[in-house]
Amino acid sequence: MFPEALEYHVAPYISNFVKWLLHTCGPAFDAFSNSLITIMVQIEHGLLFIPWWLWAIGIMFLSWRITRHIGKTILPAVLLMTIGMLGLWDVAMETLSIIIVSVVLALIIGIPSGIAMAVSNRVNTVFTPILDAMQTMPSFVYLIPALMLFHLGKVPAVVATVIYAVPPVQRLTNLGIRQVSESVQEAALAFGATPWQLMKEVRLPLAMPSILAGINQTTMMALAMVVIASMIGAGGLGEKVLVATNRIDVGGGFEAGWAIVVLAIIIDRLSQGAAGKFDNTNIQR
Amino acid sequence: MDSNSETYILEVENLWKVFAKDKIECNLYDAAAVGKLEAAGGVVAVRDISFKIKRGEVFVIMGLSGSGKSTLIRCIPRLIDPSSGRIMMNGDNVSEMDQEQLTEFRRTKAAMVFQHYGLLPHRTVLENVSFGLKLRGVEQKDREMKAEQAIEQVGLKGWEAHYPSQLSGGMQQRVGIARALVQETDLLLLDEPFSGLDPLIRREMQEELLRLQEQLHKTMVFVTHDLSEAVRLGDRMAVMKSGEFVQEGTPQEIIMHPADEYVQRFVQDEQKIALMMEQDNKPSNVRTLPVRSGGCSDKAVSGTRR
Ligand SMILES: Nc1ncnc2c1ncn2[C@@H]1O[C@H](COP(=O)(O)OP(=O)(O)OP(=O)(O)O)[C@@H](O)[C@H]1O
Ligand SMILES: [Mg+2]
């Protein structure tokens, strides 16, 4: 046994720090929470407002544009229908709205910071170990800070999801920009490109395939995290799984799990397809 | 502005470029200090080079791989910042320009053609050629009109909507040349533009460049490691070796009077060709230029003496 005399707890200090933080910055946190909730509710309403058949048509339309393959066009729509048939339509839309908000926030944070890493070696050396650490940490860990600052509900779920989902897009933005050929960049500079023009006209467009791959990965990470975040009150499909697990309700768990897998497949296919469309670096026609 | 800067469009004075880990603080004219720099892993790529180019002249810089040609030509628009020395263009001191003036200089005064083309893979031929004008903020309609003209000049009409990856090497370099021409700069900087092309295409491109030069009368700095290219294109040329000009003059002077062993090795073949031509058809200016006996390889020398 470890001697009790050597025990030392940091928990009270951390709790006090968070209390102090909430006391001093409380209004800011509240404002952030409220606006996030408002946005999420709006998006959820929007998603539910679209009738199911329009969803099916929309997804078939996008799949057709991306794949030009009849089977690959009909399958996603049929899969989506199964979610409705299992009675999980509204819950799935709840999950989707959290994913959308989280991904948008993750991109707003991840892409500019990835650009900053590509532009400045100093920023790169600061961020790289942080990103490494973030990717080795189990996803549960992200629930803690979110929980501390925002208690239970959708807002901490989004915060945890955003933190978890930022690294891939940030990394791949940085990598994509750094991999742009030196000789192409030199030519642009020789013709009088300013640093901003170089970024906008050369580096970002040529990094686009890498950035889009990052967006795809970030989206998939967000989906995974939203399910886990049901533990702190994200609601949606994750909550169904959680409840089913606690009740040892195998059938219910399978249905909710199925819906999550369907969402994952559809989102992955669509975002990868979009990435392929935007891949403008090796155009062969 | 004196009359000097009227005749000379580009003047490079005592240019140095040292690649070193740390900032260079020593006196570059102190041989011992430079030796120390090199011993510490520094590379003196350009060593105290000066030259002047007249308006409308094609100045060829020739030398083996690693002799510093690319570094030298990149120092002119300061894609590489020289360690020391002065670059004057049309009486403006390029070496003292701030970032804004330098951008303006690169946009309007000097255009460059690269060995590896440096085309934007995600842009069409038309967009690539009009890229420089876009950077300047020229309206789309105007820049496409000018780009069309340049594309026609280099013989690529009909390829405007293609992407670089769809073109052969020679055609890509034509795009590179059109992109430089459309800038309407006095000065063209060409860094081994034809080195990546096979001999027949290379020959074709050289002729194309000569044809364009007849119309446009540009001032050119042309880097190559190929003597026949230098002879064909150059009004004047310089031979470069480990960062220095070992000889400067017209191609003929250099072929007939190689300054040392290094230049001699370059010009051997060309001398033989000249001698063969002389034997075939008598009237040739080669005969009037006595070959310097000292540095010449035996065959070439005995050939002339006979
Ligand atoms: N960024 C750099 N850092 C350090 N050394 C460099 C750098 N760029 C060039 N050098 C060195 O400077 C010397 C001259 O290089 P440069 O590229 O100018 O030669 P070059 O004559 O153009 O050769 P090539 O025919 O192969 O193009 C070489 O020894 C090269 O290793
Ligand atoms: Mg070179």
Image (spheres, rainbow, N blue to C red):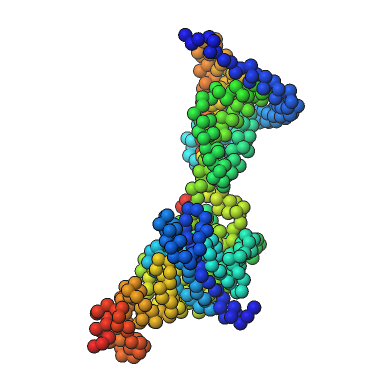
Q: Quadrant of residue B242?
A: bottom left
Q: Position of residue B166 (x, y in %)?
A: 45, 57
Is residue A22 found left or right of B87 in the rendered image?
A: right
Q: Position of residue A8 (x, y in %)?
A: 57, 15
Decide which of B280, A3 is in the foreground and name it: A3
Residue drawn at x 49%, y 64% is B28
Residue drawn at x 50%, y 53% is B22
As drawn, B276 above or below A8: below
Residue drawn at x 67%, y 22% is A17
Decide which of B301, B121 is in the foreground and name it: B301
Asked if one can make out residue B26 in the rendered structure from this viewpoint, the answer is yes
Is residue B143 found left or right of A37 in the rendered image?
A: left
Direction right: furthest residue: A27
As drawn, B220 above or below A270: below
Residue drawn at x 38%, y 70% is B226
Decide which of A130, A233 is in the foreground and name it: A130
Q: Position of residue A70 (x, y in %)?
A: 49, 37
How many numbered marks have been drawn onto this rendered protein structure?
0
Q: Position of residue A145 (x, y in %)?
A: 61, 24
Asked if one can make out residue A38 in the rendered structure from this viewpoint, the answer is no
Is residue B206 found left or right of A227 in the rendered image?
A: left
Q: Quadrant of residue A142?
A: top right
Decide which of B280, B158 is in the foreground and name it: B280
